[in-house]
């Protein structure tokens, strides 16, 4: 029996409570327990590790995080991200609690493996070292997701008893970061992980993935020298390259391509998501709970490299999708754009107000913004839109963009650096005019920062990066206050300059740059101090 990550064979039930506090020396004969599991199953370690991977990330989390930004809106409240996006969430928010619980469950599973791996019989020393490395990186990634949202968070490298979990205090952010980086350095410098895997182990953490996560931590902290150094090493030694087709990056036929550094693992029939139901138009069976915003559409530049509002732009508001960054067409579904079915049929979408089955305002299952998502469309889906397509968590273009951002912040982004980072990204996207692909000589540092940041937004749109970006850039209070918009209908009521008002958002800079500690957790543990102004 293969215990590969792609199969995600779940281990037998592990004891997740405070087993260490119970004095038992006789195991039940009719089921596996924590007393017997590790010592009697030679594959216990890899099964437990595969369980750790299930908490790495998922398609729902990635896409719904976009609705916490100026990229997207979700009309689905309650368990999703609408209240975070509009600033109305509270200490009892269910999504905030879900993220907290999920990440700490992942951390607990990693700690459980690390505490018990010595008990697994006949485990090859090299495999053991690799499993430890994978678990430590996965644990660091979970802490990264927590501290970037909550700030100070409880930090532990052991499986806590119930009593301990009800008294542990928050660890200061600096210590959490130092501990994450220490784990990553141990794994990277100690060569715990390979640089690649065979076909049966695709999707596991590699040395390069560990380095990329380390770079992301430094990116969030604004340590530009470290970001520059780490990403430069990946660029020169990692062997990655941009995949030939931007749209093709997100097709199931091209999974594990030359650009993918880390992705979350799904598989048709055995582990699937139904995210397409949440973003496709009614004509394809979707409900469009999640929709791109006009603000995202407006951020895509013209083919000549100018923005739509820049002096001398060729943008024509009466023909808004013409001569635009080709990534817009690959990411957002607008009137005249199309989905390609498995048999090659093109399904052209009409998003205009009151038009057809998919038009804005036609029904409750239509887009709330007049736009639909095209990225991550999987035309190999099974009935009721189930898909085994992997969401990409880190890819090589992200490394290039991190490198470019570090260099521009350090005042070192010149033509040579541009040609190694931004230019190949734009070349692959389909830009051909020199004004778009060549280094903008004479541009100020502030202008170059603006260009690099917008390039990051366009390249990585709807891939789950935007929320961390607007938080670390401290621009969330600029982009998440006031009305967000949908397509232009030219109506007077309910629009701004003809663009549909979708939601009036509020972001309090004194409060919302950190999420609240879930009140349910504080009710159980009085040592969890709340974040400011919550």
Image: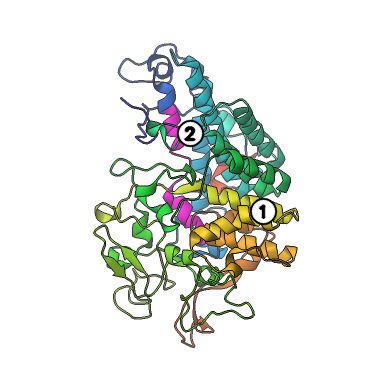
Magenta stretch: give its range.
48-68
Residue 270: image quadrant is top left
Residue 6: image quadrant is top left
Q: Earlier in the sequence, mark 1 or mark 2?
A: 2
- In the displayed structure, 7 sits above or below 127; it is below
Q: Secondary structure at mark 2?
A: loop
* Separation (CA) of disc 1 from disc 2: 27 Å
- In the displayed structure, 310 sits above or below 383; it is below
Judging depth in this view, the residue of 159 and 162 nearest the camera is 159
Instruction: Pinpoint residue 526: horizontal percent, then vertical percent.
Output: 63, 40
Q: In the visual, does 493 lie left or right of 452?
A: left
Viewport quadrant of the N terminus: top left
Instruction: Let me know if residue 53 is in the magenta part.
Output: yes
Residue 227: image quadrant is top right
Judging depth in this view, the residue of 267 and 446 nearest the camera is 446
Dot 1 surroundings within 10 Å: few (below 14), some, or many (20 or more)?
A: some
Query: Disc number at residue 196?
Result: 2
- Residue in the picture at 66% in, 58% down: 511
Instruction: Pinpoint residue 42: horizontal percent, then vertical percent.
Output: 39, 17
Q: Secondary structure at mark 1?
A: helix
């Amino acid at each position: 029996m293969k215990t590969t990550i792609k199969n995600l064979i779940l281990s037998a039930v592990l004891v997740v409570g405070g087993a260490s506090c119970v004095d038992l020396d006789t195991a039940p004969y009719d089921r596996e327990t924590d007393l017997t599991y590790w010592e009697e199953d030679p594959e216990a370690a890899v099964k437990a590790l595969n369980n750790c991977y299930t908490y790495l990330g998922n398609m729902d989390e990635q896409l719904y995080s976009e609705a916490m930004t100026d990229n997207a809106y979700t009309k689905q409240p309650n368990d999703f991200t609408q209240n975070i996006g509009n600033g109305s969430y509270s200490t009892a928010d269910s999504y905030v609690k879900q993220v907290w619980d999920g990440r700490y469950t992942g951390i607990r599973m990693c700690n459980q493996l690390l505490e018990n791996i010595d008990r697994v019989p006949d485990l090859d020393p090299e495999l053991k070292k690799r499993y430890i490395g994978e678990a430590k990186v996965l644990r660091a990634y979970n802490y990264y997701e927590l501290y970037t949202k909550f700030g100070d968070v409880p930090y532990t490298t052991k499986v806590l008893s119930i009593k301990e979990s009800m008294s542990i205090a928050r660890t200061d952010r600096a210590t959490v970061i130092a501990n994450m980086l220490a784990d990553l350095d141990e794994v990277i410098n100690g060569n715990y992980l390979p640089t690649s895997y065979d076909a049966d182990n695709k999707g596991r953490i590699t040395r390069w993935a560990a380095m990329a996560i380390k770079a992301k931590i430094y990116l969030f902290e604004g340590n530009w020298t470290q970001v520059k150094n780490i990403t430069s090493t990946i660029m020169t030694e990692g062997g990655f390259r941009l995949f030939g087709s931007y749209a093709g990056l997100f097709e199931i036929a091209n999974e594990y391509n030359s650009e993918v550094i880390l992705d979350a693992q799904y598989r048709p029939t055995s582990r699937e998501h139904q995210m397409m139901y949440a973003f496709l138009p009614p004509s394809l069976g979707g409900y469009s709970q999640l929709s791109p915003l006009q603000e995202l559409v407006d951020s895509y530049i013209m083919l000549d490299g100018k923005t739509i509002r820049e002096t001398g732009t060729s943008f024509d508001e009466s023909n808004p999708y013409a001569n635009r960054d080709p990534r817009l067409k690959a990411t957002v579904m607008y009137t005249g754009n199309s989905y390609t079915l498995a048999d090659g049929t093109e399904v052209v979408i009409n998003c205009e107000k009151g038009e057809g089955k998919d038009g804005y305002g036609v029904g409750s299952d239509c887009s709330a913004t007049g736009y639909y998502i095209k990225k991550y469309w999987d035309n190999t889906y099974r009935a009721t839109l189930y898909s085994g397509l992997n969401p990409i968590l880190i890819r090589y273009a992200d490394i290039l963009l991190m490198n470019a951002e570090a260099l521009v912040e350090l005042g070192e982004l010149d033509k040579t650096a541009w040609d190694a980072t931004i230019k190949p990204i734009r070349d692959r996207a389909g830009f051909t005019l020199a004004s778009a692909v060549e280094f903008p000589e004479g541009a100020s540092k502030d202008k170059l920062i603006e260009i690099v940041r917008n390039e990051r937004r366009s390249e990585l749109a709807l891939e789950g990066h935007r929320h961390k970006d607007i938080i670390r850039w401290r621009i969330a209070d600029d982009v998440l206050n006031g009305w967000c918009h949908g397509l232009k209908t030219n109506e007077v009521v309910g629009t701004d300059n003809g663009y549909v008002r979708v939601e009036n958002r509020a972001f309090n800079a004194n409060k919302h740059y950190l999420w609240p500690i879930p009140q349910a957790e504080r009710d159980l543990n009085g040592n969890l101090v709340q974040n400011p102004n919550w």
